[in-house]
Amino acid sequence: MRNALELVNVMMLVYLVVLDVAYGTLALLGWQAVESFVRRRPVRDYELVSSSPLSPPVSVIVPAYDEQETIVSSVQAMLALHYPSLEVIVVNDGSSDMTFDRLREAFRLVPAARVPRSAIDTEHVRGTYVSAVDERLVVLDKENGGKADALNAGLRYAWTPLVCSVDADTLLDPGALSRLVWEFTSRPDTVAAGGIVRVVNGCTVVDGRVVKVGMPKGLLPNLQVLEYLRAFLGGRIGWSRMGMTLIISGAFGLFDRAAVVAAGGWDPRTIGEDAELVLRLHRHRRDNGLDCRIMFFPDPICWTEVPSTARSLVHQRDRWQRGLIQMLLRHRGMIFNRRYGAVGMLALPFFVFFEALGPLVEVTGYLAFGLSCALGIASGQQILRFLALAIGFGFCISYITLLMEERAFQRYPGWGSLGRLLTLSVLENVGYRQWMALVRSRAWWSQLRGDRSWGAMPRAGFRALSPTVVLPRLELVEPLDPLAPVPPVAVDVEEHTLAG
Amino acid sequence: MLAPILLTVVLVLLAIVVARKLQRDLREERSAQRRTLLRGLLEEPDSRRDLVAAAACGSRYAQADLLGALAMAQHDGRTRIADALARVDRGRVQADLRRRLRARDASTRARAALLAGRLGLDRLTDELVELLRDEDADVRLTACAALGLLESPAAAAGLIGALRTDSILPVRIVERLGRPWAVDALLAGLAVAGDEAPHLVRALGLAGDPRAAEPLTRLLLEGELEERISAARALGSLGGELAGAALTGGLRDKTWEVRAQAARALSEVPTAAAVPLLESALGDANWWVRTNAASALGQAGVAGQEALRRVAAGTDRFGAERAREALDLSVRRQEAAHA
């Protein structure tokens, strides 16, 4: 028993050292990327992208299922994006509430035939509509098929060379889209790009826009503010710096439409459809000898409402972890496969050992160490070493992340916010992180049981956060140019001679 | 041993976070002062010397503020600064920027390029043209922007030359060239153009110069497929009677892509003469042509709506469907506008 515990403790320490070195490296790479971004920011002419008639047209696909509380303000925010050639395709995925009625009423929808551009199978689309007050808004009403199926329906009807997937409960900064498009136009080998997601809880939202950033009220949303900062600034940017971006958040991502269509669209069989698509893009492009630049961009900001109750947070994290496990199982052939370069040899093994199996190892380690302490096996030196590696290093990463935030963005101004974030970094590493490890370990059990549930999250809705919600301004804009250059697509429908 | 080291690191990082916050507050205060000063300097011609000095030897932050102030300044404001440079210290500024254009750090090169463009230092044109082939995408795009700001024949030639390479996405160059100052160079370039012709055509359309109408019309009738499509788009941007007449002719093109684009462009150039042809285009074999023609008629006022009503009541099912939709949308749009 004693020997077994000592062995587990040693293995745990080795594991923590490797994990800390990996996270430390990612944080430093993230710092480097943020520093480079800050230095280049003044010379990037985002204004040109957001005003030029030659900027590539973009379809923003918004899957909506039972989003009656937020859908109107979300669509208003998307139509208000600073981008010259934009269409917003809202896909009502068989909502059981008033989502479609709210849209019809607010935007005066009229039926309009629309021809699919790509041959991707989806559930039946019952009707296509366009807004009489803003021609850029298209609404697809379809049978329920899940988020991935709704995204595929939007992809099928999108005419533009770039498509942007945005959650219906997400708010975008007005310049977010043009900044991501900049990436595509400055480097044409880019096939996908994502940006930082931030927590909207606690912010003031007016007419679908975040006008004042604030810290949320409850402890859980507060902890998630710091967690999101660390995940994006301390993790994803680092991976992106090495050309190994594996996750573009479903809340906001921009894709080369042709590349997504060629890869088969979003997979309705998985619950982590966002990460799965990115991995499939890597796989498909490399299998076919094509360039594959997938970027995570430090700046484009979108805001999302995070769970404020323990129950909904547990559901969300359980789902995320199951999505990760599914994705890794589905693409296990890529792991340690030299054909997929650094993604196969480094990023995927990291995700297997530290993201998928990590929570199990962590929980086992905590238990073994607790038992060792109780039985008097672990010395004081060992306890200190364990705490330093397991918790102390977490503080370092959190503080580096806060430094990056201060250096580049300063979205949380004032000493009060900083003080709160510093306090949260303690709470996050002592208690919250361990709880999350437990929740994520439990997801393995859910996965083995074959649980495919999504888990509901009660939303306050932006209306509650917003002092005013107004109808969209009456603005008639020119329709998209359907003949804008579109890269060749394998399964595209080039010409339709039949109406509708 | 490990724990004390880590504890020290944590405390040091904590101190740095607080120090950075203090430093930022201080820097923001200074930056606000600098921006106020720069705004004042741009409005008071007598004090321009200080501004030029800031451009020449300012810190990175001062440069950033200067770029911001110049970006906000109107064209005559930039010209005044260039005049001041000519009188005061142009040589030193140019030498300094020339050195920075060759710096190892890409962001330094990019900032210097933008500053050269915004200050109108056309003696640096060669260096900027060279940067169009830089290894860094940001530097290439910034050099492209800077050449667009210089508005000189040499800059236009450099940009047209870059269209023959694949170092920059052509639309980003076309955006810079699509201005009245570049029309002469574009027309000259079009006369000898190869594969870059569709891009030059697009830029001519954006420039909106009436001299472009004739060569664009010729290209719409006689060019290759890509050129005809580009010409139709460009004529739509150009507008005017001549463009409308040419686009009406484009509706008879043998290729559906050109017919569809001509119909689409005609919605931007409303002309009564086009209504009968657009009405006929509703019977086109191609969905895109029918849809674009219906959309153009929906925006062509009363005559367009009448044409849509005729087709909607007709026997051609495919044309009637498009016409009904466009009519419905057009009427609802009118209602919404009145409401």
Image (cartoon, coloured by chain):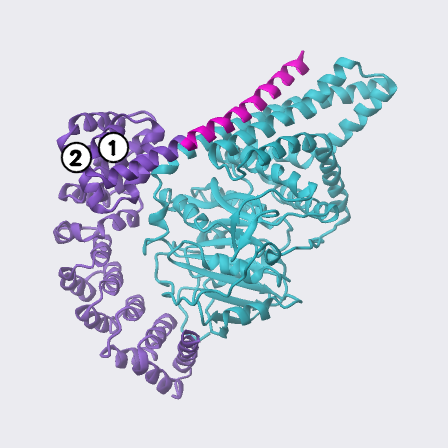
Chain colours: A cyan, B purple
Q: Which residues are magenta?
A: B1-29
Residue for badge 2: B84
Q: Specify the quadrant of the image occupied by residue A321.
A: top right
**Crowd class of label 2 (few under 14; some 14 to 19; many from 20; radius 10 Å):** many
Q: Sort mark 1 into few (<14), some (14-19) or many (20+) by Cα contacts within 10 Å.
A: some
Tell me which chain the residue with mark 2 is part of: B
Q: Is residue A375 visible?
A: yes
Question: Dominant secondary structure of the magenta stretch?
Answer: helix
- Residue B90 vertical position relative to residue A192 in the rendered view, above or below: above
Residue B315, image x, y percentages = 39, 88
Asked if the stretch drawn in magenta spans residue A488, the answer is no
Q: Amino acid at mark 2?
A: Ala
| Apparent side of residue A269 relative to residue B244 in the rendered image (left or right) | right
Q: Position of residue B267 (x, y in %)?
A: 30, 71
Q: Does residue B36 lie above or below A389 as drawn?
A: below
Secondary structure under badge 2? helix
Identified by mark 1, the residue type is: Leu
Magenta-drawn stretch contains B3: yes
* Circle 2/circle 1 CB separation < 8 Å: yes
> Which residue was labeled with disc 1?
B51
Q: Is residue A26 rendered to the left or right of residue B247?
A: right
Residue at 42% over, 34% down: A38
- Please give the name of the residue rendered at 66% of the width and 23% of the height, measured from the top-left corner: A392
Residue B240 location, quadrant = bottom left
Which of the 4 image quarters holds residue A345?
top right
- Residue A438 or A350: which is nearer the viewer? A438
From this viewpoint, is residue A121 visible? no
